[in-house]
Image (cartoon, grey):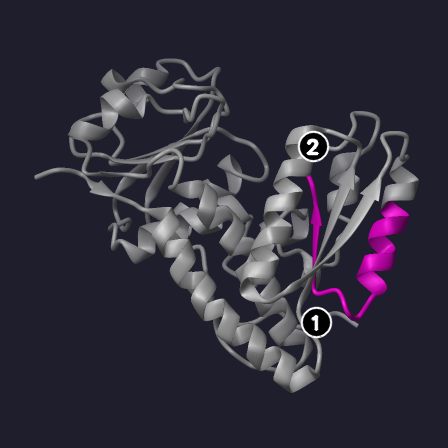
Amino acid sequence: MPPLILDGTSLAKSIEGSLKLRVEAIAKRSGALPILATILVGGDPASATYVKMKGNACARVGMASKKVELPDSTTTAELLAAIDRLNADPNVHGILLQHPVPKHIDERQCFDRIALAKDVDGVTCLGFGRMAMGEAAYGSATPAGIMTILDHYKISLAGAHAVVVGRSPILGKPMAMMLLNKHATVTICHSRTKDLADIVRTADVVVGAVGKPKFIRADWIKPGAVIVDAGYHPGKMGDVDLEAAAPTSCAYTPVPGGVGPMTIVTLMRQTVEAAEAACGIQKEKTHHGGTEKKLKVQS
């Protein structure tokens, strides 16, 4: 039997369709559209492209976006002040600080300045801690999108051994906690792990999140494993050698068209959830494979 393609593009389009209806309901209830504020510091072309893509996604679901563009010379204090203004703006429902910021800025301090109720990209330490403990929080967008894919395609995680290769604070670490919360047995690895190939060979689910093209080789992955490739590099390559590994897998996310579209639509969905909370529409929200109560808006 050929492997199942975990198509993130078609799933994201389906979710966008439902988000349009939710945005219309918010506008009818409050007289205003959900707003995602994006902060771009400096002139990095790749970051500018990502911010543009997120703005386009807002437009597709009928949301509004607010762009905050700051020069390379911006200080940590100036960036914190910009975040404070967005936190205080009742018309802004979600805040995205585009990573990375210039090296002289304390990125972690700035991430943690974002109000929990507006942390729709799941980047704060508080949000991570609450998510890890099973409390209401917006999950980091990429791993939360991955969990939505796995849930949609009915990939069984309970009791499975999942190996996450990568430990970044916005991908590898939250990914591991989300899998653990769905009853997987989780091993976190990285580029310095000893006997990495042997560990990956024990995995029922392999998550490539190390940020290096084709770092995970096909002969590291046992036949019948599920492959989730969260990487994207020039030449349309991921972190896994998918061309060689995918044919013997049980299921895999393609690159492109797998994880990427789900990252963006998760950001949109979580902004819509924040707007629903702000205008008093009480609904359950579903992310990273679980259903949780809505966050209360902080006044």
User: To which quarter of the image does residue 101 belong?
Assistant: top right
Report the amino acid beneath label 2.
Answer: Pro
Q: Position of residue 85 (x, y in %)?
A: 87, 58
Residue at image point 69% right, 41% down: 98
Which residue is labeled 1 in the image? 297
The residue range painted magenta reads 80-98
Residue at image point 81% right, 43% down: 69
Could you tell me if the residues under marks 1 and 2 are in contact, i.e. CB atoms within 8 Å?
A: no
User: Is 92 in the magenta?
Assistant: yes
Could you give the CA–CA distance between mark 1 and mark 2, rounded to whole angstroms? Answer: 27 Å
Local secondary structure at mark 2: loop
Mark 2 surroundings: few (<14), some (14-19) or many (≥20) residues within 10 A: few
Residue at image point 33% right, 36% down: 254
Front-most of 5 and 45?
45
Which residue is labeled 2 in the image? 100
User: Is 1 in the magenta?
Assistant: no
